[in-house]
Image (cartoon, rainbow, N blue to C red):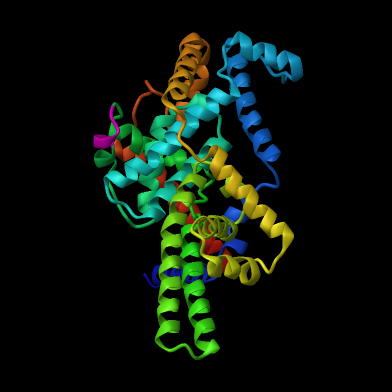
Amino acid sequence: ATKSRSRRRRRRKAFARRKNEMNFQTSTQKKSWMFSSPEHLARRRREQRKKTLIALLRGRNPEEKEEKEGEEETLLEKEFSFPSAKDEEIYRKRLEAKIESLCSAFNLPVKVTVSATTLFKRYCLANPIMLTNLKIVMVASVYVACKVEESYVSAEQLCKVVKDIDYNKVLNAELAVLQGVDFQLISFGAFRPLRGFRADAIHSVSSSNNNEGGGGDASSNSKELVVEKIRECYNKSQEDLKKQLLTDAMFLFPPGQLALSAFLKAAREMGCNELEEYIVTKCLRNEPDLLKNLSIIENMAKEQGEEPKDTEAKKADQAMKAFQKKNAKTLSAALKKQASKENLGGEDEEEDDETRKQKKQKLVDEERAKEDAAFD
């Protein structure tokens, strides 16, 4: 009993220390989920398509080991009726966009939407999405995010909003989502730094006006007008941050730059010169590279930050269904293997509660053993 209490105390201390030290610069988000360029992201997605192709080839011939490259790979994709990379992107993006409406249905805080979208995007980047039921993954991402952000909503409640999904499949998929993102659940979004920039901008403007002296009531009224305008810019910039969630910006730029890009765009559109000056001179220190980054983020939100049109989404959905229908038999072995590990296949056998609990407990015990070893 004494040893058990000592172990619990060590774990509590370790968790408190990690929580106090938690920041973007030392996070798994920066280490594992930030990329140098859009081309790097495109390569990762091509790798996932190649994994799907390999699964198909081995489903057709279990002895298949040779990897296909170049033109041969392209011909095989046509043979298996692969959806185009664009259709795959639209299919994924349509589900990303549904996360916000699902969270809104339960009046969940924006941090849950950010966390769920981040988890879903990470999963899609690290796993072959054509070998899984992506709609279940989307709901499971929201379910996990509710737990991570301490805003719990049951899987059964979520599935009352999202039609045609059995909540047991969502529960079974929870472990798959955790494994799919390598248990890296912490995410740093742009909404929190945006609040910090708003508070600092208001303080900066207020202090500046106070230091100028004179003016009396006129100066006070001017200050209040500027502060009110900054608050309006803040509200407007939140909408832009939601658009950014549908882009790859979170994989390419740190949260602070994402927040400043939206804030600066709102300041220019609303003609708030004081806020624009604060961002450019105080936050960015007139650095050309940082200004360029903010411009790139703004363009990404403008060009990629909208939910796909219904016609595009319908075409992508049909392409995905046609692929799955044509290759149903060939994919069967690969899907069963994937489902046995993840329980995400559409027709796969469900685990009972006891089996699911045992799997989760095993993972928890392994993590505790690692943590205890660090203190022994």
Q: Is residue 76 left or right of residue 160?
A: right
Q: Quadrant of the C terminus?
A: bottom right
Q: How many marks?
A: 0
Q: Is residue 334 visible?
A: yes
Residue at 68% across / 59% down in the picture? 290
State the extent of the magenta-drawn residues as a range: 159-163
Quarter of the image with the N terminus is: bottom left
Q: Quadrant of residue 353?
A: top left
Residue 43 picture quarter: top right
Q: Percent position (x, y) of residue 64?
A: 67, 15
Question: Measuring 45% from the left and 83% from the top, which residue is drawn there?
Answer: 219
Question: Which residue is found at the position 62% from the left and 19% from the top?
Answer: 53
Can you give x and y, in whole percent of width and height, for residue 231 in the image?
Answer: 42, 66
- For the residue pair 145 and 245, the one nearer the viewer reads as 245
Q: Is residue 160 magenta?
A: yes
Residue 326 percent location from the top left of the image: 49, 9
Between 281 and 340, the one lying in front of the other is 281
Judge whether residue 31 can be spotted in this image. no
Magenta part, dominant SS: helix
